[in-house]
Amino acid sequence: MSEAEKSIFRQKSDAGRDQIRNGWKVLRAHGPSQFQFWLIALLIGIAAGFAALLFRKGINALQWLAYGTEDMSHIHSFAATLPWYWVLSVPILGGLAVGLILHHFTPDARVRSVSDVIEGAALNEGRVERRVGVASALASLITLGTGGSSGREGPVVHLAGVISTWVSDKINANGITGRDLLGCAVAAAVSASFNAPIAGALFALEVVLRHFAVHAFAPIVIASVAGTVINRLAFGDITEFALPTSTALEFYVELPAFLLLGLICGLVATALMQAIFFADDFASHVQKRTGMPRWMRPAVAGALLGLLAIWFPHIIGVGYETTSAALTGQLIWHEAIVFVMLKVAAVAITIGGRMGGGVFSPSLMVGALTGLAFGLIATSIFPDVSGSHTLYALAGMGAVAAAVLGAPISTTLIVFELTGDWQTGLAVMVAVSMSTALGSRLVRRSFFLSQLDRRGIRLAAGPQAYLLGMFRVAKLMRKPDDPRAAPEDECWDLVEDGVYIDGNATLEAAMPIFDRSGARFIPVLTLGGEDQPPELWGALFHVDALKAYNRALAAVSEEEHS
């Protein structure tokens, strides 16, 4: 190559680097264009799909080491052949490892899951905790690989959120872009986990973003398809569950039975959720009273699971083998009832014991068993007008899962995609609608929103409620040196009347004070110790609070209708 050619090559190379550098600056300063955004959505979908795939492979590998098989659909059959002391010790060791990971890498020794992703979408501009999220994913992988009775969708969804958060931080994405990228990651992770592209996209919109804005639909679908392709390249185009026979609905006469099944499933779903909350509260109480180290809590939960698994290995893992047995009618009535109660107890121990994992797969198992038990009764009472009892298992699977997730649309579709049976839509839709209607009134809309409500994050009531908690009084108040500040003597008069607020409070606490007092402004104080007088920071004016709140409501409405 001549000197002239080398010089031209260097000029072209330098120009290319300058264009890339300038493009990166523009991307960070002004956000991605539509084409760039769709390309980023595709890349996030691929990354989240591979993360879900590796997570599943990791569970399989750990199960092979612990139980001698990497086939999740036959895990309990292999565990039943192992010595009792092995079945007991594996969950204990897994729980101990989980406890140590959470103790050292999380501030509260709690695994992050879908509820934290929903919180990130609503309150943190589409961001989730990155370091804690990776630790949570590892803890959940160990939980599921060593006999924990939970599901893999929760940790996979949060792990996908970690990926989108990293990208959002790199490109300095605003709130709308960050939330859309989070939705893309979630859709791809769900699709890659369950080979369910339609349900994955709708799950991201219905559960995580909680709106169906048109601007978010296309990139989320792109990411969902990318995740599905990765799943099918690894496992082929197969469904998670195989139904051996057609489940035709007989003359529509059975529809009232599915209405009743939906109500029963709503109660069962509520019992599952309340059992988890009770177990969490009880374990926290015992931990506080006994002074148990927080890293020991998952190990104790593992011991309880191991004891159950000695006699009932069906509780181990996500429960696909038992779910498949229910969908194919291989269980009798009393087995279905017993396994429902055992699975509810096992899931409560796992999640209440802070071991990790999600609730979707367990809710599928509990729903399929509930539906099968109901179907066996219904078809025996009315044999002449009844179809297959396995149809009730299919409808029950969707009904319990929909009530737990608070996602009737995406759950209905994911049941179809998991089974490949699209001929029984009426039965599943009727049961899902009734269970969701009942379950949403017995808890805070869903398991995830109830979890957030227990932590004081009230997203279930909608933006008109949770937006107030996003504004700190100290950020909105007028300081004493402001030209429009409140008169200091009037502030102290209000303080003497008991009308004041702490600067660290939010509008959620301030607005009721305005309503009660009728004041134009509220003095903002910092309260010292017993011997220290309070210090006046400034005053929060009612009009400033209302302006900030109205702007936030307008921004949410604009995003949801764009």
Image (cartoon, rainbow, N blue to C red):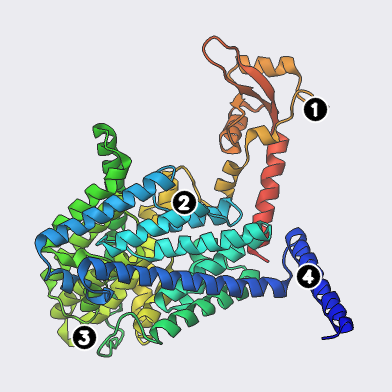
CA gap, disc 2 to disc 1? 41 Å
Q: Of the residues shown, which amino acid type is indicated by label 3? A: Val
197 sits left or right of 281 in the view = right
CA gap, disc 1 to disc 3? 78 Å
Circles 2, 4 touching at the beta carbon (< 8 Å)? no
Q: Position of residue 323 (x, y in %)?
A: 25, 74
Q: Position of residue 455 (x, y in %)?
A: 44, 44
Q: Of the residues shown, which amino acid type is indicated by label 1? A: Asp
Q: Of the residues shown, which amino acid type is indicated by label 2? A: Val
The quarter holding residue 394 reads bottom left
Residue that carries the numbered disc 4 in the rendered image:
17
Name the residue: 30% across, 81% down.
Answer: 241
Q: Quadrant of the N terminus?
A: bottom right
User: Which is closer to the viewer, label 3 or label 2?
Assistant: 2
In the rendered image of this protein, does residue 167 appear above or below residue 536?
Answer: below
In the rendered image of this protein, does residue 292 appear above or below residue 398?
Answer: above
Q: Earlier in the sequence, mark 2 or mark 4?
A: 4
In the rendered image of this protein, does residue 129 appear above or below residue 207?
Answer: above
- Circle 1 sits in a helix, a strand or a loop, which is it? loop
Q: Position of residue 336 (x, y in %)?
A: 16, 70
Residue that carries the numbered disc 1 in the rendered image:
482
Name the residue: 22% across, 47% down.
Answer: 300
Q: Earlier in the sequence, mark 4 or mark 1?
A: 4
CA gap, disc 3 to disc 2? 54 Å
User: Which is closer to the viewer, label 4 or label 1?
Assistant: 4
Q: Residue furthest top?
A: 531
Residue that carries the numbered disc 2 in the rendered image:
132
Residue that carries the numbered disc 3 in the rendered image:
385
User: Which is closer to the viewer, label 4 or label 3?
Assistant: 4
The quarter holding residue 273 reads bottom left
